[in-house]
Image (cartoon, rainbow, N blue to C red):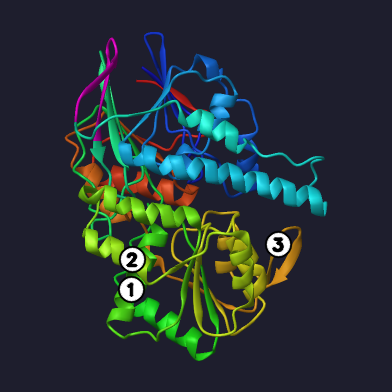
Amino acid sequence: MRIQFLGATGTVTGSKYLLEHDGRRLLVDCGLFQGLKQHRLRNWEPLPVDAARIDAVLLTHAHMDHSGYVPRLVKLGFEGRVYCTSATRDLCRLLLPDSSRLQEEEADFANRHGHSKHKPALPLYTEEEARIALKRFETVPFEKEISIWPGWSWRLGRAGHILGACSPRIDWGGGSILFSGDLGGNDDLMMRPPEAPAPADYVVVESTYGNRRHREADTLGTLAEIINRTAARNGVLVVPAFAVGRAQTLLHCIRLLKQARRIPEMPVYLNSPMAADVTRLLRSHLDEHRLTEEQCAAMSQEVTIVNTIEESKRLNALTGPSIIVSASGMATGGRVLHHLKAYAPDARNTILFAGFQAAGTRGAAMLDGAEAVKIHGAYVPLRAEVAHLDTLSAHADREQLLAWIGAQPAPRRVFVTHGEPVAADALRLAIEERHPWPCTVPDYRDSREL
């Protein structure tokens, strides 16, 4: 077996791992690069392997940095099947067309306003191409050994993190390899914790929070303080939130605070039709999270769902205390950019980030104290309060990652991926200090015989 690392090296985006054995090629994850321009440009570069020669794709979960390149792969000639859990398929049916629409809208906006260096600006793929790609999806169950080709099989363990997230162990005639995917935390407010890992000869583990622990804090209390001081200023709270997972957790938290009368009554807007659809999906996959069907239903009842562009535009003229939850979570695109343009210049308002912000994103720049951020070709002054609710992360922290991998008997080698360089190397050192296992942080396009 040969593995090549085609993404999620030196960054938390672009997850792609190519496995080659006995004439077959399996791509584990097929994600978009996000964040730094040097990473985003890789989305447009030719793959080091002909897409038509890849036999199948296996997705660990639906987030765009793990699934968002699938339509591009199909466009480049991939003709195989895309395997995933049923919840991942359901989410991709929402995410991939939405991603393509945003790309088309942004390309059209750039062409009409002339702020793109490309003439014309083009989307990476269109909505039609995304829907064609979705026809290749095929679901597989958790925890069942599946034989895909002679000498190949896999089993999908539960990873927590978001609906449908899995940690696949892939077996071949000479060994086995386990991919963590993105691991959830043990104390997530909404998702169930990840399962103990299946033993494997090789392990590929994520390291998003490989150099830090989630601080112990009263998440609801901190969120209440942020909301209350914004309301006291008669301001608007804008929350860039990932449409899958984070938006639902935030709505659940806001509802709990309102029930307990810890925050004032104020309108809450969910300006992401996709996030609204994801919220409804929770009721179809009750075995994967902690909420009851009643709690899932209540989550949407006290929120105004914003569907049309006209309704979205009206949110930019709110005059009293309000909360807007809108994608994307790192402020890299989507409707939230228009809200940032409207509310970031006013010191009464607050911009709240509720998760990891990759290097090169607007979210990272704002948390680092930027005085202005560039949106749609122009700089927007940043006078609003910028807050970070880092206790809502959907990723396992350093100690949880070490506990998960420590449940392994003795892998031959551990590969640390999906982390910024400092985080990945910190987790490598921590693993080596605790276990006598060889541990490697691969570079982009590195390959190794297993």
Mark 1 and mark 3: Cα distance apart in space? 33 Å
Q: Quadrant of the C terminus?
A: top left
Point out the stretch of residues depicted in magenta: 144-156
Of marks 1 and 3, the one in the foreground? 1
Which residue position holds label 1? 255
Q: Earlier in the sequence, mark 3 or mark 2?
A: 2
Q: Tag 1: Cα neighbours inside 10 Å, few (<14), some, or many (≥20)?
A: many
Q: Is residue 296 visible?
A: yes
Q: Secondary structure at mark 2?
A: helix
Q: Position of residue 263 (x, y in %)?
A: 37, 84
Mark before the other along the chain sequence, 1 or 3:
1
Comes first in the chain, label 1 or label 2: 1
The 10 Å Cα crowd at callout 3, few under 14, some 14 to 19, many 20 or more, is few
Q: Quadrant of the N terminus?
A: top left
Give the label on residue 438, or none.
none
Regarding residue 391, the answer to whether it shows in the image is no
Q: Which residue is mark 2?
A: 299
Q: Quadrant of residue 308?
A: bottom right
Reply above or below: 140 against 264: above
- Residue 148, given in percent of the width and then of the height, sits at 30, 17
Few, some or many residues within 10 Å of mark 2 (<14, 14–19, 20+): many
Question: Toward which corner of the image does residue 159 lie, by quadrant?
Answer: top left
| Magenta segment includes 383 | no
Image side of residue 41 versus residue 418, left or right = right
Of residues 399 and 254, which is closer to you in this image? 254
Q: Position of residue 158 (x, y in %)?
A: 24, 42
Rendered location of residue 177, percent (x, y): 29, 27
Q: Amino acid at mark 2?
A: Met
The residue at which mark 3 appears reads as: 374
Which residue type carries mark 1? Arg
Callout 1 secondary element: helix
